[in-house]
Image (spheres, grey):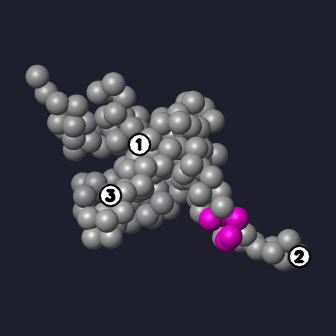
Amino acid sequence: MAYAYDMHYRHATEKPTDFWAKQAADLHWDTPWTSTLTSPDPALPVKTSASWRWFDGGSLNVCYNAVDRHVRDFGRGSQLAISYDSPVTNTRRDMTFLELQDQVSRFAGSLAPPANAASHHGSLTHVDGFYRDLSINLSIYLSIYRDLS
């Protein structure tokens, strides 16, 4: 019997566009993507070009997908979200999704401009680079978690 990770890995390597489209469909998108994978040269294999664009035209809010949905949409507020254990500092801290949401909200508030500021353009809601990769990797872990549950 194949393990969930092995099945996901095989699907991701054999049919990456299909695999990632399925994973991305589990996320909340503010603007749906128009193309799962856009290539400057379709003849090139996926792994050969840094100029490939995944989920072209799409935008999402990583924080909403990683934290807020678990509290609001899935009722996981009281479930463990983070377990921090550092042997270096001898610190152990568990945090539920609701506590994490509160901490993230407080931090985001500290980044907000003063009420009298004319404009603020520091949004991370667009899908690009690191933030897209982070949210998609979270989606893989959530997918595996669902399969194992």
User: How would you rate the neighbour count of disc 3 (Cα within 10 Å): few for under 14, some for 14-19, many for 20 or more?
Assistant: few
Q: CA distance from mark 1 to mark 2?
A: 38 Å
User: How would you rate the neighbour count of disc 1 (Cα within 10 Å): few for under 14, some for 14-19, many for 20 or more?
Assistant: many
User: Of the numbered discs in the image, which one, if any, rests on residue 116?
Assistant: 2
Measuring from the top left, give residue 125's x and y in whole percent. 61, 57
Q: Which of marks 2 and 3 precedes in the sequence?
A: 3
Overall secondary structure of the magenta section: helix
Q: Which of marks 2 and 1 precedes in the sequence?
A: 2
* Residue ranking furthest to the front: 90
Q: Residue at x 76, y 74 (%)?
A: 113
Let me know if residue 110 is in the magenta part: yes
Q: Residue at x 56, y 37 (%)?
A: 77
Measuring from the top left, give residue 149's x and y in whole percent. 33, 25
Q: Are marks 3 and 2 in contact (CB under 8 Å)?
A: no
Q: CA distance from mark 3 to mark 2?
A: 41 Å
Please provide the residue range marked out in magenta: 107-111
Measuring from the top left, give residue 131's x and y in whole percent. 48, 60
Q: Which residue is mark 3?
A: 85
Q: Secondary structure at mark 1?
A: helix
The type of residue carrying mark 3 is Asp
Horizontal relation, residue 20 to residue 10: left or right: right
**Quadrant in the picture for the N terminus:** top left
User: Of the numbered discs in the image, which one, if any, rests on residue 100?
Assistant: none
The type of residue carrying mark 2 is Asn
Q: Residue at x 34, y 33 (%)?
A: 145
Vertical arrangement, residue 1 with respect to residue 37, above or below: above
Asked whether residue 39 appears in the rendered view, the answer is no
Q: CA distance from mark 3 to mark 1?
A: 24 Å
User: Of the numbered discs in the image, which one, if any, rests on residue 139?
Assistant: 1
Q: Residue at x 48, y 49 (%)?
A: 95
Q: Nearer the viewer, residue 43 or 1?
A: 1
The type of residue carrying mark 1 is Ser
